Image (cartoon, grey):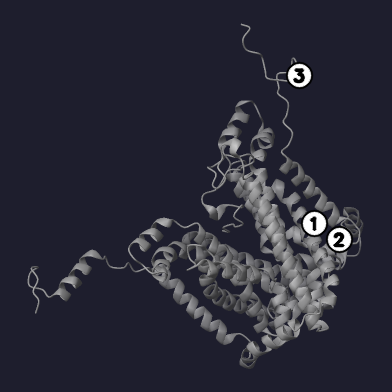
Amino acid sequence: MSAVPAAPSSRPGSARPDKPPPPPFVLWGSLGLVGLTLVLGWDWEYGIGFSLRDIYDNLGRYNPVLEGVRNLDWSTLASPTVLAGFAETFQMAAIATILGGIVALPLALLNSVTGAPNTFVYVAVKNFNSFIRAIPDLIYAVFFVAAIGRGALPGVLALFFLSIAVIAKLTSDIVDGIDQGPVESARASGASHTQMVKTAVLPQILPGYTSFALYTFEINLRGSAVLGFVGAGGIGEVFNNYYQRGWYDRLVAVVIGFFVVVFIVDRISIAVRKRLL
Amino acid sequence: MARTSTGGMTDAQAQQRSEDIVRPEKPFNRFRWTVTITLLVLFFVTSATVDIELSQLAALPERTLFYLGLMYTPPDVTEAPSAITAMIESLGMAWIGTMIGAVVSFPLAFLAATNLFGKPVVFAARQILNFFRSVPEIVFLILLLPVTGLSPVTVALALGISSIGTLGKLGAEVIEGIEGGPVEAAAAAGGGRLQRIRWAVIPQVIPEIVALWLYRFEINIRNSAVAGAVGAGGIGTLLVRQIGQVREWAAAGTSLAIMVIITLLVDTISGRVRRRIIRGPTRAVDLGANAGEQPEGTGPGAGPKREGPTGSVGGGSFVPV
């Protein structure tokens, strides 16, 4: 009974082995996480000065939003401006999603090794998509408002680019993950690149693509809330108007109305997307 | 008249017949047709009714090129330092926002996972997450402004609150994808629910959840532009001022370029780190994992993988449903 030692431990009498030190990646990664938070959160030249204490101290200040919540003005939801704002938001989101969806499909196909005819096109389109994605919708909106004037058109354009960014990104990811079998058999039977994409790639990605387009409609509805602040139409114009005047009783009512609308659309969209996939 | 042996038909007839036999009739896809027609109708109705003047649309290409010309012939590089400072502020809002979202969403993700909690808890947690997901950043921002004022901190808070929904939902999906073995082992050793979560669930999900944070950080960098709507700092505010208010086009050209470059740079770094987190070290020869594709669940820190590249955080993508 003398052959096997009780436990491979450095400490005699201890049954539990020593805990191994964390791998360098985990160690440095955690330090980086904490370090970045401190550097960017601290109150100095390059930090935003985040302080829970400040927030806590400010909670007791007079708060017009809470005042607005107490005297909600529901009647404002039925006013023509608000209804027109909601209608415009829907119109903008619908047009932008449909146009963006049409443009995004080829961009998504060319953004993948399988879908692109050659490496040059693949790299070019990939970079183009990243570029489109790097500019936020609000910046598109402010540019087009400055270029062609206020209204729904700059808003549609901003959401159009947002839609391209979202749909192309998500769809190209499923193009990368498709079953390569049909692609191979299309090539083996002598299909041209276009024929291959049409018969072997498209049928595999269409359900996902349609689902993403619907999802983008939800994103566009939500996105339209901010565009009005720079004059690009939609319900955001109403938000901005009430916010500038400090009419929080109406603002909060419209915000709640907006939330309900978005929530209902989300539910419908999710139900349809479940059916699709 | 070439006659074939098949019952006196011409070649053309024979081919036609063979096609009729070999190729089945294309099924009529009612769902696809409904979708297509609905979309067409929707598009034409909305386009016809929306308040867009045709003159605006006609002027679009020319005006766009004109102002792009003002921005980049040449851009005013003397404005670069202020743009970089503003961009750092944006990164700060995005990062702090992400951390706020991470901290709050972490417990919610567990509560929303069907394999850990019962139906009522999961349902309640999911509704909370849905709420945060449905409200756009700008709404949180204007509702918070009276509390913390026009400052980057307010933007960070707004970004954080709206990150809770997505982070929690995706986190819950990660948790639902774990392997049951360790949980069973912990249960067999007498671990309660909290102990099971601490020792069997968290170690499995933490890499993917941290990767989610980084992914959300990339999104929040873009979303931090929302500050520009009210003037709460960062690159968004700078660009809205330069383009929309004072119309310093050449300076705006520089700011825009800097924003795009830094955004893409951070994306690249963050994407690499995420891939490293999910896939483990590339040269993991001693662990028997090959450099390219790893089989499921191998490699240090490799969390459970959902099927295919679509679900993988390492690939930088999610399938939202």
In x, y percent, where is residue B281? 64, 44
Horizontal relation, residue B200 to residue A252: left or right: left
Task: Name the quarter where the N terminus of chain A is drawn.
Answer: top right
Q: Residues within 10 Å of mark 3 (few under 14, many from 20)?
A: few
For residue A246, say whether it is visible: no
Mark 3 and mark 2 lie on one chain; the one further toward the N terminus is: 3
What residue is disc 2 on?
Answer: A48
SS assignment at label 2: loop
Which residue is rendered at x = 66% and y = 29% of the image?
B191
Q: Which amino acid is tagged 1?
A: Ile
Looking at the image, is B190 positioned above or below residue B309? above
Q: Which residue is mark 3?
A: A11
How many C-alpha atoms fall within 10 Å of the one at disc 2: few (<14), some, or many (≥20)?
many
User: Which quadrant would residue A126 be assigned to in this image?
Assistant: bottom right
Badge 3 amino acid: Arg
Relative side of B79 to A104, left or right: right
Give how far across and how far down residue A232 sits, in percent. 70, 81
Q: Nearer the viewer, residue A78 or B265?
A: B265
Q: Residue furthest top?
A: A1
Disc 3 and disc 2 on one polypeptide chain: yes
Q: Residue at x 63, y 64 (%)?
A: A263
In this picture, residue B247 sits left or right of residue A135: right
The chain under label 1 reads B
Nearer the observer, B57 or A242: B57
In whole angstroms, how far apart are the C-alphas of marks 1 and 3?
Answer: 43 Å
Q: Which residue is mark 1?
A: B96
Q: Amino acid at mark 2?
A: Ile
B32 w.r.t. B203: above or below = below
Q: Chain of mark 2?
A: A
**Would you say residue A109 is visible in this rendering?**
yes
Image mark 3: chain: A
